[in-house]
Amino acid sequence: MFRFIIHYGLHFIFPVLLAYWFFRPKFKKVSLVLLSGIIIDADHLLASPIFDANRCSIGFHILHSYIAIAVYTLLFVYRPTRIVGLALLLHILADTVDCLLM
């Protein structure tokens, strides 16, 4: 239960708090972008089984690969795509914490 709360808290609550703390004038828009980072979980549809509670997503799914993480980091570094990169890296962070708590 603890792992579930931490994992989904990092996916859904932490991005909204970050948007509120650091992007207050654009809070709603940035919140939606940060929350949309969950879209990279679409790569789970290519796995069999689609969901496995004991599988670490990092390095297993294509959008959770180390090459993809490098691209997300580049998106974060480049100013016009910084918030999108942050959204994707926050998703990776949540999944990494989940892997560590397994």
Image (tube, rainbow, N blue to C red):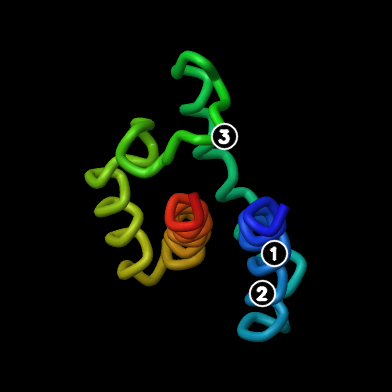
Q: In the structure shown, which secondary structural element does the residue marked by tag 1 occupy?
A: helix
Q: Distance between the residues labelled 2 and 1?
A: 5 Å
Name which residue type carries label 2: Ala
Q: In the structure shown, which secondary structural element does the residue marked by tag 2 occupy?
A: helix
Nearer the observer, 2 or 86: 2
Nearer the observer, 93 or 31: 93
Q: Is residue 95 rendered to the left or right of residue 77? A: right
Q: Earlier in the sequence, mark 2 or mark 1?
A: 2
Name which residue type carries label 3: Ala
Q: How far apart are marks 2 and 3 (CA)?
A: 29 Å
Nearer the observer, 7 or 65: 7
Residue at which label 2 appears: 19
Q: Which of marks 3 and 1 is in front?
A: 3
Q: Is residue 66 rendered to the left or right of residue 79? A: left
Q: Distance between the residues labelled 3 and 1?
A: 27 Å
Q: Which of marks 2 and 3 is nearer the N terminus?
A: 2
Instruction: Please report the residue visible at 61 percent of the width from the left and 84 percent of the height from the top.
Output: 22
Name which residue type carries label 1: Ser
Q: Earlier in the sequence, mark 3 or mark 1?
A: 1
Q: In which quarter of the image is residue 50?
A: top right
Residue 85 appears in view: yes
Instruction: Please report the residue visible at 45 percent of the width from the left and 17 percent of the height from the top.
Output: 46
The circle drawn on residue 31 is 1
The furthest residue to the top: 48
Residue at which label 3 appears: 53
In the picture shown, does residue 19 fall above or below 4? below
Q: Quadrant of residue 11?
A: bottom right
Instruction: Please report the residue visible at 43 percent of the width from the left and 59 percent of the height from the top.
Output: 89
Q: Do the CB atoms of the residues marked 2 and 1 lie less than 8 Å apart? A: yes
Q: Is residue 37 rendered to the left or right of residue 68? A: right
Q: Is residue 11 rendered to the left or right of residue 87? A: right
Q: Residues within 10 Å of mark 1 (few under 14, many from 20)?
A: many
